[in-house]
Image (cartoon, coloured by chain):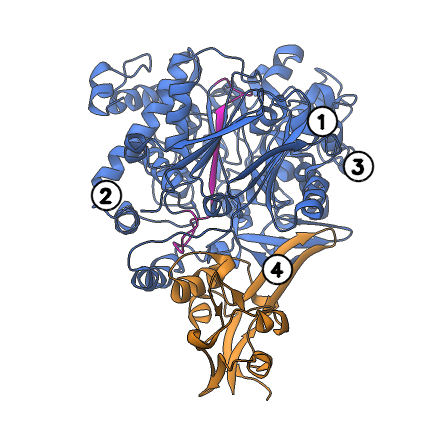
Amino acid sequence: LKALVFHAEKCIGCKLCHLACSAQNEGEFNPRLARLKITSSYNREGLFVKGQTCDLCLACVEACPEDAIIEKNGRLAFIADLCTDCGICVDICPHQVIVKKTKGVGVCVQCQSCANWCPTEALTFEEVKK
Amino acid sequence: MTYTNKILRVNLTSGQSTTEPLNKDWAREYLGGKGLSIKYLYEELKPGIDPLSAENKLILMTGPTAGTIVPNSGKLAIAAKSPATGTILDCSIGGHFSPELKFAGYDAVIIEGKAKDPVFLYIEDEKVELLSAADLWGKGAHETEHLLADQLGDVITLAIGQAGENLLPMACISSELYRQAGRGGIGAVMGSKNLKAVSVRGTGGIKIADIRKFSAAMNKIKREDTMTDDNMWTYTDGTPMIVDLSHSTGILPTRNFQEGTFDQFENINSDAVKSALKAKKACFACPLACSNYVKKGKTEVEGPEYETLALCGSNCGIGDLEAVIEFNRLCDDHCLDTISTGNVVAFAMELTEKGIHDFGIRFGDIEKFLTMPTMIATKQGTGAELAMGVKKMAAKYGGKDFAMEVKGLEIPGYEPRGSWAMGLAYATSDRGACHMRAWPVAVEAFGDVDPFTSEGKAELVIGMQDDNSVKFSAIFCDCWAISNERMAEILSMLLEREVTAAELTTIGERIYNLAHLFNEREGFDRKDDNLPARIHNEKLTTGATEGKLLPKAEYEKMLTEYYKLRGWDENGKITAEKKKALNL
């Protein structure tokens, strides 16, 4: 199974991945709607870099009571008609990369827009443990 | 269309905030950023006001590229009348504030008046609040940002340190600890308004037509025009790369511009900085990541940039990278502009060594050097004298001939005796000695153009000033050597109308002329467009510029030609014909 992998040591914190994701999947430039979370900022201890991406752990698929999130050909798919906006998937995602929207949720479909935009190969699409 | 068409106006005297539509005619003629903020200031400020009075205004201005996936579009313009020079002042700051403001729904914030007690401005989409900064006042910018993050969460903040609170002419505004709107005392304008910080959180987005197609086009441009050999030096090295170039071409300011080479340059060059590198860091939407996050010994900083290495390193006779990093960190925390601060310290060193006045500090004295940022920012002891800036120090103590400033703004890291057009660029810059309005060293000292002739230099400087005016208005970062054609192509897509390269050239000329008109209205003319006497009268003694100076007659020749090509009269006043042609 292949999925997105984040390499913190290469990340420059430009947020182009967030913009690429929201443009591709939500039709707007809005980093808060991205289906990944890359942080690069300073706290009192110095530079703090952290990346959260969907690694296809499928916790959301297992948790959804309505089968509105399924795994198909190694990718998540969201079936809007089945979603009741219960929010269980948003809460259960260990990486906090499911975006709650006014109606329904946004899940990472491994479209790789983020990796295609990343200027430093800090995001790659590769085999993940399953 | 990527304007939000909404301006937030905050009056600190009344505590009220209002929104108003963006002036679309002005946006068409001045784009955003530098140009549009100067237009608002020109129309709204009364001539002759005290820059540190409630009558001055502080404008935070984004551009049409802000918040989008356009490479290198992350910068913000911050503008006001300058307390250091009395001229117009627009600064450029990187980081993430500009897009965040756009996501909150605003093209710009105009801050007026003066708060009775220290406050900070908190913007979260439509919610705008002025909150007490009583607990923040007196603190450095770094702790201020940390405390605001504790209180507000994931906001982006602009803050001032002690230098801004104490109204220093070299006080800057800081963001994300290590990004600065550096020059001309922009931080003192905030301090004079009792405004400690501005924090913003924006949750909205920006929509444009065919966003997927647009993104694909931008990704191609990013690969083929941004991340190219012309620009990737900013990633591999960043600005410290310029140390070797400046030293080898004899234009590295050393010991208060007494020499153009530094015997310890290898201690503070790019290789030295790389040896301390921990991570590369970028502004929003920037693939070039020019910043170097470094740690050495007990200190760390995002930097030091070339200007800091030159003005606080070689120019102070300091060949110790750890000392320069620590000085840089202290300046950032107190919000001191490192260009001006390096200059005042070097000037005090020369005054002391020449026996003109004893400031108790000499070239290369690391221990004393490291006490200076705190002493200057808090005006302790001799720090209170240095806090005046080089021009006022010279008026009080002497040394005017080697007071390295233009119009009250200290000179950046390029020796004009080894790059004559750079001298003209400093003298004709709209905010005093500045290397961001035009950077002709790239083609003179570092390129093929003869640095030691006045021939063709006026035209060279004018072209660069106009081009940069457009870049800083659109906004594109100067790290990307982008052409007007490329800018026109991108802006056409964002603004959903045909923008041509020729139109951008005219806009650039209009912006530079409006900035000049602002200064003209404040009483500036030819007598102010000058360089320190050292540049004309003292020959450099080492390296590639040994024996060189910029003769006064050659300088005047360049200046006369510059006015003529600009369409200004012999005294530097814009002619009626030129005003009409540019719709000023």
Q: Which amino acid does label 2 sit on?
A: Ala
Marking on residue B471: none
Crowd around label 1: few <14 · some 14–19 · many ≥20 (10 Å): many
Residue B467 image offset from top left, x and y in percent: 33, 38
Q: Are the residues under badges 2 and 3 in a single subunit?
A: yes
Under circle 1, the secondary element is helix
Would you name the residue on which mark 2 appears? Answer: B501
Q: What residue type is labelled 4?
A: Ala
Q: Chain A is shown in which shade?
A: orange
Residue B215 image offset from top left, x and y in percent: 35, 61
Q: What residue type is labelled 1?
A: Ile
Quick check: is A101 in the magenta stretch? no
Would you name the residue on which mark 4 appears? Answer: B279
Q: Which of marks 3 and 4 is nearer the N terminus?
A: 4
How far is the residue under mark 3 from the one under mark 4? 28 Å
Residue B392 position (above or below residue B143): above
Question: In the image, which lettered chain appears blue?
Answer: B
> Residue at position x 59%, y 34% from top?
B129
Q: Are the residues under badges 2 and 1 in a single subunit?
A: yes
> Residue at position x 34%, y 23% from top?
B514
